[in-house]
Amino acid sequence: MQKALRRLATEGLVESRPGVGTFVRTIRSAQTPGFGWQTAALGAPRADLARVAGPLQTPPPDVQALHAGYPGPDLLPERLVRTALGRAARSAAATSRPPAAGLPELRSWFATELTDGTPTRLSAPSAGDVVVAPGSQSALTSIFRALVAPGQPLLIESPTYWGAIQAARLARVELVPVPSEPGESGGPDPAQVRRALTETGARAFYAQPSFANPTGARWSVERAEGILDAVRAHGAFLVEDDWAHDFGIDADARPLAAHDEDGHVVYLRSLTKSVSPALRVAAVVARGPVRARILGDRAAESMYVSGLLQQAALEVVSDPGWGTHLRRLRGQLRERRDLLVAAVREHAPSLRLDAVPRGGLHLWARLPEGTDVGRVVRDCAADGVWVAAGDEWFPAEPTAPYLRLTFIGPEPAGYPAAARVIQRAVESGPSTLSSP
């Protein structure tokens, strides 16, 4: 009986009055509210506020999800997370306010991880260089606001992470796309980066050197050195988003920040995707005055990150089981990547994979020239397969029609059937070239 009453109360059908009893809630008359006045009060948007991007949309049950940006529960350290949350809830973190820059122990862990890849001849980052943020999206917004004034240029890879594009637009900076190629030794051409810095006077360049989202590109050592040289020569910052640090498959991430001691690289590292989407914890490593500006923006934005979440994240990454989980995850990602690659090549020959990524979570698939990407996405969804339109990853006009396909959703055994659905969607209907 109590369970039934709680369910009815949750649905707003009954209400409990202590000491009196439980009563049927009065049904309110349905009236259509008028919000038209808000249009005049708000005026035009001050930024291009995009709709919720495809990777964040939740599909209905029984759908083959190839669009998601977050690994499913079976790819996460669920036991470690549950244990860590319990420990954190019993610690002082449950009732205390953490420092604005983050828990010292967690900041030290982030700094030590980066130090492990730093050559001994260079000075290593310390906990004092780290600022903890509530996820990479919030961190990107603060970084862009700290580095680039509204209306000023920001170099950005094209294509690149849609969340970075959105954060930059909210910061009201001028995006300057730099072409980036997929695959091993992919990424932007250092000469083009140098030219863009010279022509625009930009003082910041946002990039993902290791397993870029969506292309999977991993910069070679020579390319990384060339781009760092260009950034140094122009007195600029490189915003390094190491989003896939924990998602190496056939290779490891190579943080450029580990080879920078002059403060040109602002390094971003998130635990949200690899630990749990419920623990939105990221870190910015910045050296010099820029760190103070980023910290000031973060403090003004949200004062501090929940100490409970920080402590739980620290418990997970400090546990001996964390390394075991990452080793197991590498094998799981390799198996799923290879399954999806094989399914696309056999059952969706219209899609072209220019490169198989050695890390990350996605395949970047090119569609035939003139394909109506939006129609393909809608047709696939109607047939039970969700894919992401590649247009969302371009800061300007798309250079070609693409789909981003992820291999982190449930039911990898369904990849061949999903690939056949995509092939049918590509083959059916008019292309953009033949549309009136």
Image: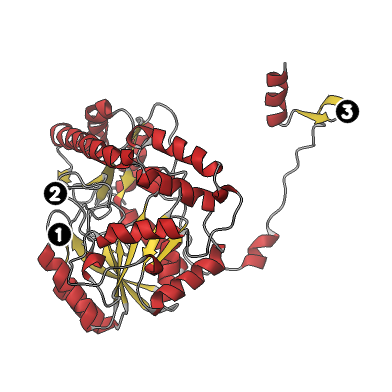
Q: Are marks 3 and 1 in contact (CB under 8 Å)?
A: no
| Label 3 sits on residue | 19
- For residue 186, which numbered disc appears in the image? 1
Residue positioned 14% across, 73% down in the render: 226
Foreground of the two, 119 or 399: 119
Rendering coords of residue 217 (x, y %):
19, 55
Q: Are marks 3 and 2 in contact (CB under 8 Å)?
A: no
Residue that protrudes farthest toward the top in the picture: 1
Above or below, 205 relative to 352:
below
Question: Considering depth in this image, is 182 or 39 the residue closer to the camera?
Answer: 182
The amino acid sitting under disc 1 is Gly
Q: Earlier in the sequence, mark 2 or mark 1?
A: 1
Distance between the alpha carbons at the discs numbered 2 and 1: 10 Å
**Color scheme of the displayed model:** secondary structure
74 to the left or right of 421: right
Which-is-in-front pick, marks 3 and 2?
A: 3
Rounded to the nearest angstrom, the CA distance separating label 3 from label 2 is 68 Å
Left or right of 73, for residue 398? left
The amino acid type found where label 2 is placed reads Ala
Q: Amino acid at mark 3?
A: Gly
Q: Which residue is mark 2?
A: 355
Observer able to see residue 23: yes
Q: Is residue 138 above or below residue 14?
A: below
Q: Residue drawn 72% across and 19% down?
A: 2
- The x, y position of residue 223, in whole percent, is 13, 67
x, y percent for residue 71? 35, 40
* Element marked by disc 2: loop
Q: Are marks 2 and 1 in contact (CB under 8 Å)?
A: yes
- Horizontal side, residue 394 vs residue 348: left or right: right
